[in-house]
Structure formats: C-alpha cells, structure tokens
Image (spheres, rainbow, N blue to C red):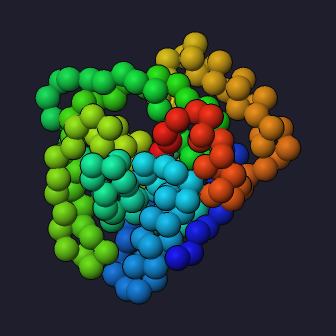
Amino acid sequence: MTIQPVRLFGDPVLRARADEVDTFDRELQQLVTDLTDTMHASRGVGMAAPQIGVGLRVFVYDTGDAAGHVVNPVFDVVGADEQTGPEGCLSIPGLRYDVTRAQRVVARGVDVHGVPIEFEAEGLLARCVQHETDHLDGVLYLQRLEPATRKQAMRAVRESEWFAAGKTVMSAAEVAGSRAESGRSE
Ligand SMILES: [Zn+2]
C-alpha cells in the first residue's frame, strides 16, 4: 500500500493532457494500486493519475456499488437524460458545486493487462467516469460550472486556506479531513 500525496488546483499536472498508456508492465500495476490506495485514504469515489502527479490516462473508481480501474478510457453518452447534482474534487478540497452531466454513459478502455473493458454506468458512476476522463484532458469540474457559479467557486478557491498558502499538494489524510465537511469527491 503506497498512499501518495494529492496534487491540488494550481499544480500544472492537473491542466495538462495525460498521455495514452502503451506499456502494460509492473509500473502500471503499481500506479493502479497507488491510485486505489490514495483514493481510499482520501475517502474519494474516483481518482485520476494526474491527481497523484502522473500524466498517464488511468483512473480508478469505487462508488460503493462498483469499483475498478480503466486505462486509456473513453466514453459515449447514452440517451439524452442529464443529472444535476453536487460534485467535488479531491484536488479542490472542501468545495462542492452542482454540475450537470449525462445520466448514462458507456465507458470503454483496457485493464492493467491491456484487456478490453466496457461497462455501462448511470448516476454516480456515470458522473465519476465523466469527471475522471475530464481530468485526463486537463479539465477540472470548475470549468463545467455555469458562469455565475464558476465565478463564485473561483472566489472560494482563492479564499481556501491551502490555496492562499500556495499549497499544491496535500496528504490523503488531510484531503479526507476536508471531505468530511463537504461530502463525497472525485
Ligand atoms: Zn477530481
């Protein structure tokens, strides 16, 4: 078990497009293990590799009902139904805002051995797939907010103790502590 520090808003790794994985080795297995351990220690429902400083297209999830990982994920929206609800991010601790996402998606990718994966997700898991895939494109959920809410959120970020202190990394335990105040995060 190797719990890694969590990168915070302001770290450039979170704004960069992550690279496709093309080597399925022990290092990749270790990355998936580290991500899973760090997600659990942060008490999150999902976590993408850039959040622990690794610019590779990998995410893990654990909604309580479903858990796993996806390497080189893509997704297709199924139907036109949307969901609007509170979303948080382990890299923006302590804050949550309503985000509108597709209600249902089909996620595709490969596993740690390069074996194809495909699953249909709805509700929280669908939200998680969209949030984590955004991370791999350097997109944070703040960018998905309505303009007025986004302005309010950016003000809250600037007023956060960690941001004001210039912190771009936090221990998983500290993130978990901030989550206790704000609910689940990805
Ligand atoms: Zn996130």
The residue furthest right is 165
**132 displayed left or right of 109:** right
User: What is the x, y in percent for residue 21?
Assistant: 37, 71
The residue furthest left is 79
User: What is the x, y in percent for residue 77?
Assistant: 21, 36
The residue furthest top is 148
Do we see residue 15 in this rendering? no
**109 displayed left or right of 25:** left
User: What is the x, y in percent for residue 157?
Assistant: 70, 32
Q: Residue at x 35, y 48 (%)?
A: 63
Q: Residue at x 52, y 76 (%)?
A: 1
**179 displayed left or right of 162:** left
**25 displayed left or right of 122:** right
114 and 36: which is toward the camera? 36
User: What is the x, y in percent for residue 179?
Assistant: 59, 41
70 and 11: which is toward the camera? 70
Do we see residue 100 in this rendering? yes
Q: In the rendered image of this protein, does residue 71 appear above or below residue 106?
A: below
175 and 59: which is toward the camera? 175
Q: In the rendered image of this protein, does residue 139 appear above or below residue 5?
A: above
Residue 104, image quadrant: top left
Q: Residue at x 47, y 54 (%)?
A: 47
Report how many numbered discs are placed on residues in the image. 0
